[in-house]
Amino acid sequence: MNTMKSKTITGRYNPELTRRLQGLVDAAWTDYPNNPVVEPLQKGLIADPTVVTPSLSPDGQWHMITCGGGHKVHQWSSPDGISWTHYAEHVWNGFSPYIYPLNGKFYLFYQINGNPERCWLVMRETEDLKTWSEAKVILEPDLPWEDEEYRPTCRNACVVKDPEGGFRLYYSGGVRLIPDLGFEEPANIGVAYADSIGGPYTKRPEPLFIPDKEDPYRNIGAGAMKVYYLEAYELYLGFNNGVYRDADGHSRSCINILLSEDGLDWYDTLNNPILAPEPGWKSALVYQLCLAVSGDKWHLYYNAREGWEVGVERIGLATAPLNGIDPKGIIS
């Protein structure tokens, strides 16, 4: 059980960091009017989008990788990032995929769900987004805070290349069973370091985020976070979807933007949350996401849940103007 003293993020601002990224902090995020853009193949869910934009893909198309029912990993392609066609599925017992393009290869991280014993992170690689290597174990749960109420877990990977040349792996450790959902959600967020993308990774012993009963967006769990290093501003940009209980007792999740100079000490921003539950297809939770850049806009793909224990999850798209922000460092 995690016994660390928590630190509320909500309302903790750094005016200097905000000023450096004012165009992003002030940006208005707009849902695509025909959301959701990806529906489940079968009744249930399609979730955890991670995308490759045409400028980096091997065929000049958009590509998306998701997870779905039956512990499958799915692949999709699109000419415009809006109309998606399913073209492959893999029975990899996998969830929460994250893809990182590097030097002509694509590295796919995802969690193996060793239900009910434990969950860990693995990686596969490919050059063409068709033929994949065997899975390599990247991170296994072995720290006290990675073993919360439910089972030892490492999940929700996100890789960032440090300005010094190494790699950081942000991940969620430990899970809590959410009663009104009937399944677990991430409790804490940590980071590990490596000289190369395939590891070995050395974990920072203490988590960056833990649940905080005083934090309105993380009072059940810290959730997960996608992190990007914006080179022109020497800042780490985080999109965090914590898990919280609302005034009516329902579990919720929404997306908040956080900023940091070192990727360890994080600050809130003034426009949060940028995406939150609302009536309709995202009436319960808004969570896993991937940030991309296309033209003069940010593209944020995310999955949302309609309903709690009995529910459906779909993938939507929200956009925002770049507002003059240099996006160099966003790998998509």
Image (cartoon, rainbow, N blue to C red):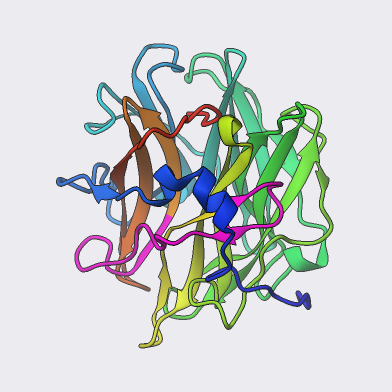
On whether residue 276 falls in the magenta region, the answer is yes
Give the percent coordinates (x, y) of residue 110. Answer: 59, 42
Residue 67 visible in rendering: no
- Which range of residues does the magenta coloring cover? 259-287
6 in relation to 196, above or below? below
Residue 43 falls left or right of residue 149: left
Q: Residue at x 74, y 61 (%)?
A: 207
Give the percent coordinates (x, y) of residue 120. Answer: 69, 50
Q: Residue at x 71, y 47 (%)?
A: 262
On whether residue 132 falls in the magenta region, the answer is no
Specify the farthest residue to the bottom.
248
Identify the image quadrant of residue 74: top left
254 in relation to 22, above or below? below
Q: Residue at x 62, y 52 (%)?
A: 155
Identify the image quadrant of residue 319: top left
Residue 157 falls left or right of residue 207: left
Q: Residue at x 62, y 47 (%)?
A: 112
Specify the farthest residue to the left.
34
Residue 305 visible in rendering: yes
157 in relation to 223, above or below? above
